[in-house]
Amino acid sequence: MKAFRLSLTLLFWMPLAAEARLYVLIDQPSEHRFPIAIADLIPEEGGKSREWSEKVSQKIRDDLELTGLFELIDPSSYPRTAEALSPNPATIQFGPWSLIGAQALVHGSYASESDGMRVSLHLYDPYLGQHLVGRKYQAREKEIPVVAHHFADEILKTLTGERGAFSTKIAFTCLAGKKKEICSMDMDGENQRQLTHHKSISLSPAWSPSGNEIAYSSYAGGGNPEIHILSTRGESRRITANETVNLSPVWSPQGFLTFSSALKGDTDIYLMDGGGKITRRLTESYGIDINPSWSPDGRSIVFASERAGRLHLFRADATGSGVRRLTFVGYHNDNPAWSPRGDKIVFQGMDMGLWDLFIMNADGSMLQRLTASTGNNESPSWAPNGRFITFSSDRHGSTQIFIMREDGSNQTRLGPKKGGATQPAWSPWFE
């Protein structure tokens, strides 16, 4: 489940003045896009795999397109002179790139080696003739996406001041024949893998804060659903065995598991350690309490509850005390997800017989709609930088995984390539 570990050599050629400048405001309206050119890599001596070069640059283009922040300049307009395409940062000519409107340029070189490829990637400001950031990679062919995702993260960090999420993953519930398993994919929809093989129904994946484990609920073994934990080695262990319904596990920032269970009759929310020992009952009220989500500081939870009649969202302190209602409109409101930035909560709400996604401030104010007239949109989950949201939607028939910006713009289908998919969960950054 972890990303490949690459051999990286960092190039410290970035002027201090460039480091402080923000080229792209990440929360700017979607119609204002930043023009960027991404050139294919130039072969150095021993560089023979032109296809390899093109795959790297195309993958970076695809990553940046997903953000909705960049205007990708058509490669057919790129300059063709040797000086403009020089792989050497000290000799490249930037005038031709400025003439086509590129406010940033990604360029580099590659060379074949006995154990793979050596790749150099650079980001420039053509107008100032300035080198902004550079990285060198040693990689094998199967690591092409890893190289591209890593440098796309560098581009986003340099131009926006905020860390990208291209090297993260999304876990989800996938169809495996007539059963449901836990699967994962890269954040661009590639590298799809089935992680569990229970040949049963497994639901609601949730990443641990370190990204080393995934908790989920499964009917494996028959009977009621129990909470399981999947390790990075692919080993799964069951941690509840209470012969009742156990659903919607989620990790607290401190690494404890919170889940919904019918241990005492109505479904309530409980806290337990990694060994399955319940340490606290967080809710106790009439009607069900389900689908908790933690604030990033670990001081509060938000959850869905029937205590007001229909499902609505409530917020409580980490101990379960101080409960206050957040939503007052809508037929049902469910599956809240607290932004890693701490300021917003996204959730699904029933409207006109369909589920749509809404976002509000963490205190329940400033309610805004993110999806409309596109079928059912459910199970939102935040990217670790709090700037993008993944969700499931049946707008094209079978339920698929999508991502969008936090304002609802640039909604893009990821997959999977085969079968349906629901309940996406975005991973943390892999350190």
Image (tube, rainbow, N blue to C red):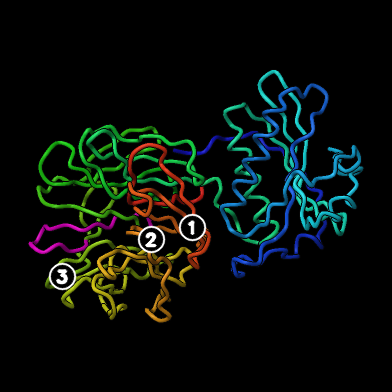
Q: CA distance from mark 2 to mark 1?
A: 11 Å
Q: Is residue 137 above or below residue 125?
A: above
Q: Position of residue 28 (x, y in %)?
A: 62, 69
Q: Residue at x 77, y 24 (%)?
A: 47
Q: Main secondary structure of the magenta part?
A: strand
Q: Amino acid at mark 2?
A: Thr
Q: Position of residue 314 (x, y in %)?
A: 28, 74
Q: Which residues are magenta?
A: 253-269
**Sequence order check: which comes first, mark 3 or mark 2?**
3
> SS at mark 2?
loop
Closer to viewer: mark 3 or mark 2: 2
Q: Position of residue 356 (x, y in %)?
A: 34, 65
Q: State the image quarter where residue 32 is shown.
A: bottom right
Judged from this view, the residue extending furthest toward the left is: 265
Q: State the image quarter where residue 176 is shown.
A: top left
Neighbours of disc 2 within 10 Å: few (<14), some (14-19), many (20+): few
Q: Residue at x 80, y 57 (%)?
A: 101
**Sequence order check: which comes first, mark 2 or mark 1?**
2
In the figure, is residue 256 to the left or right of 277?
Answer: right
Q: Is residue 268 above or below residue 57?
A: below
Q: CA distance from mark 3 to mark 2?
A: 36 Å
Q: Amino acid at mark 1?
A: Gln
Q: Amino acid at mark 3?
A: Glu
Q: Residue at x 36, y 34 (%)?
A: 194
**Sequence order check: which comes first, mark 1 or mark 3?**
3
- The residue at which mark 3 appears reads as 284
Circle 2/circle 1 CB separation < 8 Å: yes
- The residue at which mark 1 appears reads as 411
In the figure, is residue 253 to the left or right of 97?
Answer: left
Tell me, for residue 29, which label it has, or none: none
Q: Position of residue 342 (x, y in %)?
A: 46, 69
Tell me, for residue 374, which label it has, or none: 2
